[in-house]
Image (cartoon, rainbow, N blue to C red):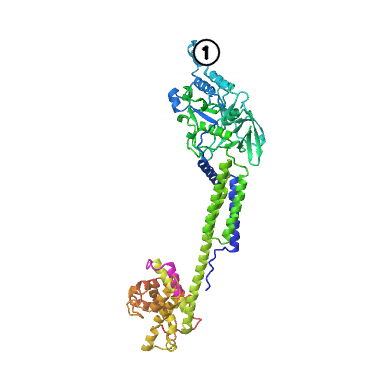
Amino acid sequence: MKPVASSTRLPRRAASMFVLAALLVALAIGVGGLLHIAVVTRLDRFVLDTLQVQTASGAPAPGAVVVDIDEVSLAAVGQWPWPRYRVAALIERIAAEHPSAIALDILFPEADRASLADIQQTFKRDFGVDVSFGGVPDGLLDNDGYLAQQMGQAGVIGARYFYFDHVTRTEGPLRPGVGFDGRLDLLALDRAPGVLDNVAPIAAQTRVSGFVNTRVDADGVLRQLPLLIEYNGVVHASLALAATMHALGVGSGTVLSDRDGLSIQLSQHRIPIDKAGYALLRFNGPSSGYASIPAVDVLTGKVRAEDLRGKIVFIGSSAVGLNDVHPTAVDREFSGLKVQSAMAQNILDDRVVRRPVWGGQAALALGVVLALMLGLLFAAGRGMVLLASLGVAVAAVLVVVGASIFVRSGVFLPIGVPLLVLATLVVLAFVARFVLNHRRAQRWRRQLENARQVTIESMAAVAETRDPETGAHIKRTQHYVRAVAERLQRTGHYTGTLTREYIDLLFLSAPLHDIGKVGVPDHILLKPGPLTAEEQVIMRRHAEFGREIIYSTAERIEGDNFLRIAGEIAASHHEKWDGTGYPAGLEGQAIPLSGRIMAVADIYDAMISRRCYKEPFPHEAAKALMLDMRGKTFDPVVLDAFFAIEAQVLDIAARYSDDDEGVAGSHD
């Protein structure tokens, strides 16, 4: 038999199907990237976070600084909330150092109950007593008014917070203090139905305000900030954006659109944003790396002028109790106050991360190209080591190129789609190769089984040319031995030997049990009458002849030899349980199980069959004779199993009867 070719090249139809499947996978993943499905989005976020961590410079932010009402300041000056006059004093000290802008990341939505004016009103209302304070300037009687006055004089950018879960009403228009023009029609901003603003005296004196809203991604990590939100038809700026505009002396920004997407133009600075008005942050390092000055140091005059002069100063609190911290790629507890500072510095340095709008389409196209490349290589029969190595190499190139572009230009290319395409197709190739090899192995196994059967049948045919014994005898004994073996297996006997493969080989090998008769002379083999003692000796040698014929053939076959069982059967099916059989006089368990099973099948069939020297025995007569030989000629367990399936035995005998063949048999 000609062996099957071992080429790994796929059949043409299978190759075409794999290439088509690879392209469909790439298209599905690419479209999923455009639609922001979770698996692609998570991979892109992971890549972005890794780039943020690995490329963080650790350099301090030179253009923005935080004045922090931290734990030390609260312990030294007083617990939160501070009286408004103390915040006003802090602003006055900062303004004296001439920063480029001051942004107050603190909201005062309710009146200060600690004001002297409020105390006067409370005593008048509750006790009817007029309380007066001597030597106090009028401006200090109202803390809210005093803070508003200081904020107005210093041009402080105030804070607002927009609600998206309920509606609020405001008296009069809510002025942002800055404006935007240009391609506003291309924006799809978040529209807030409600707002939390400073108490009226402070709001009235605040010329510019910015919102302090943040939003983490679905995985709970802060990567981007909204720079624009729409409220009552008016576009409002974030605190960081409004403060930076004030520092640059810019009262309005222009929304532009180019091939990379939307951006806000502020003087010489351009801030990339998406349609919703969000900008991707770029961090220099963890929160601790951003400049921070304790508020108590400012109040006590321990701050150098150059630490504040010409910088955007954000005033707020990082106190633990306020819980204003956010998980980021570089720091799991990044201060919300410093997030504003980081965004302002990003704008000043033109380092806001740009994610081009064409990135998704480019990723899809690249994924299709990679799918076509891997698909064609796989279809051409290239090895899995090559494909896997190529996939890893291409993935490494994508990561290196993406990182290089991110470092040099701040552009983030979404490489999650091509990376996922590569990983999916390499796995798919492994699976397809496994399936292909499995099918080839099955086909080869079928061909091998066919070859085994053809070999055995060919050898049996040689014996039949000398022995006129019927082909039906071979069929019957084949099915007898298999039925007995299966019965023994079901009843828990010889389970270590009777595997499925063993039983199949037993069935295939049974026709060779008398192949040794080819070595017996015709005048003995075909003698119509009883044999003499000398002829009987020669006749009995057919068991040895059979073993030699089969084993000489088996020696030329490599591997697990399927002729081993055939040799056992030919050599031992005339052995007897009590040791009086031939050719070796084996006894009991020393006789191979295959020979013991064959002995029962062969003798039963010889008894019920017509021979040239005898008439067939009825089944019951054959059964009685064989039961008399239990424990003498036959293994008791095997004989009991044979007659335990008596109905099946009779069915086999009837199904493969030799009534139509009319062939006389030889001597056994």
Q: Amino acid at mark 1?
A: Pro
Q: How many marks?
A: 1
* Image quarter of residue 242: top right
- List x then y, in percent, for residue 610: 44, 83
Pick whichever, 540 or 44, lies toward us: 44
Q: Is residue 491 magenta?
A: no
For label 1, the residue is 137
Please identify the quadrant where the C terminus is shown: bottom left
- List x then y, in percent, for residue 632: 33, 77
- List x then y, in percent, for residue 251: 63, 28
* In the rendered image, the vertical position of residue 1 relative to residue 15, given as above or below: below
Looking at the rendered structure, the secondary structure element under dot 1 is: loop
The answer to whether one can see residue 454 in this image is yes
Pick whichever, 270 or 217, lies toward us: 270
* Image quarter of residue 562: bottom left
- List x then y, in percent, for residue 461: 49, 80
In magenta, the rendered stretch is 492-510
Look at 53% across and 69% down and name the residue there: 4
* In the rendered image, the vertical position of residue 437 relative to residue 58, given as above or below: below
Look at 55% across and 20% down and name the residue there: 150
The answer to whether one can see residue 650 in this image is no
User: Label 1: how many residues lie within 10 Å, few (<14), some (14-19) or many (20+)?
Assistant: few
Pick whichever, 591 or 561, lies toward us: 561
Pick whichever, 212 or 288, lies toward us: 288
Q: Would residue 278 appear left or right of 528 to someone viewing this image?
A: right
* In the rendered image, the vertical position of residue 218 relative to residue 68, given as above or below: below
* In the rendered image, the vertical position of residue 513 relative to residue 98, given as above or below: below
Q: Would residue 319 appear left or right of 21 to someone viewing this image?
A: left
